[in-house]
Amino acid sequence: MSEQRDRPNAIEKALQLLLAFQTQRASWGVRELAAHLGFSPATVQRLLKSLKAYHFVEQDAETRQYRLGHVYYRFLEVLQSQYPVTREAAPIMRRLSYETGETVHLNVIDGRERLCIDSVESPQALKAGMPIGNRSPLYAGASSKCLLAFCPDAFVEAYLAEEELKPLTPNTARSVGLLRAELKSIRAKGFAESLAERTLGLGSLSVPVFGHGGNAVAALSLAIPELRYGDPVHKARCLALLQEAGRELSQRVGHTGPYPPG
């Protein structure tokens, strides 16, 4: 009886199926997905048919593989309308992208990861992309480290004690001691920077966004190709504009003290 209770029902199976679609694996064939989930191909086919009817998934006519459907854009609009930081950030992000010529993205902590919740792509041919929904560990990249640095001390200490630092590139932090020192430096400077820590060829700058009471609610960031990141004049200009944007956005979402807080 206990084994039967532990078996996922149809709704749980459908949710597990949808969660299998990730940035690193955006499309699946029926048999591949069945093997990945441990379900029978017939079960996966039946679930996909139902999900397709409501546009949660769609099927490529040529490859016959399934990918997420367009219905999620409706959810995205609802989510963005519910979070003041996203609403307030939109015009600031568009202006910042225009002024710097770089990709601007807004990030929050989701569990133990950085999650991109909004992005404005660079208008230049050579650009660094940051799609909405992109995730990364909190120890790799400027936006991740910025979010972690301005978290409450208890969260930071618990994270450092429990998280295994798996290098994503040769430049990713490899020891808790070095990461702890870098987080302290980020707090002191009020911004984070990184080069090829998460993706080779990509540099990044990030500043915290504070809400009412001085709590960090998000990180506003620039993704910059290494070619332009290595230009000290361009990098300095980008940082100055980013810091001003972070200050303005913080004020718009209720922060009244100094930026960043001491």
Image (cartoon, rainbow, N blue to C red):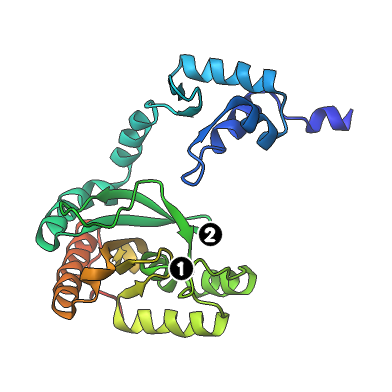
* Residue at the disc numbered 1: 140
Does residue 128 sit above or below 150 in this rendering?
above
Identify the residue shown where x is 50% and y is 42%: 22
Circle 2 sits in a helix, a strand or a loop, which is it? loop
Q: Can see residue 211? A: no
Q: List the residue tagged with mark 2.
A: 112
In the image, residue 255 lies at what x, y percent?
Answer: 25, 64
Quarter of the image for the C terminus: give it.
bottom left
Asked whether residue 158 appears in the rendered view, the answer is: yes
Q: Is residue 228 left or right of residue 83?
A: left
In the visual, does 103 lie left or right of 175? left
The answer to whether residue 175 is left or right of residue 257 is: right
The spot of residue 31 in percent (x, y) is 65, 27
Quadrant where the N terminus is found in the figure: top right
| Residue type indicated by callout 2 | Arg
How many angstroms separate mark 1 from mark 2 (CA)? 12 Å
- The label nearer to you, 1 versus 2, is 1
Q: Could you tell me the amino acid type at mark 1? A: Ala
Residue sticking out furthest to the right: 1
* Residue 89, numbered label: none
- Nearest the camera: 236 or 95? 236
Q: Residues within 10 Å of mark 2 (few under 14, many from 20)?
A: some
Q: Residues within 10 Å of mark 1 (few under 14, many from 20)?
A: many
Q: Position of residue 251 (x, y in %)?
A: 20, 62
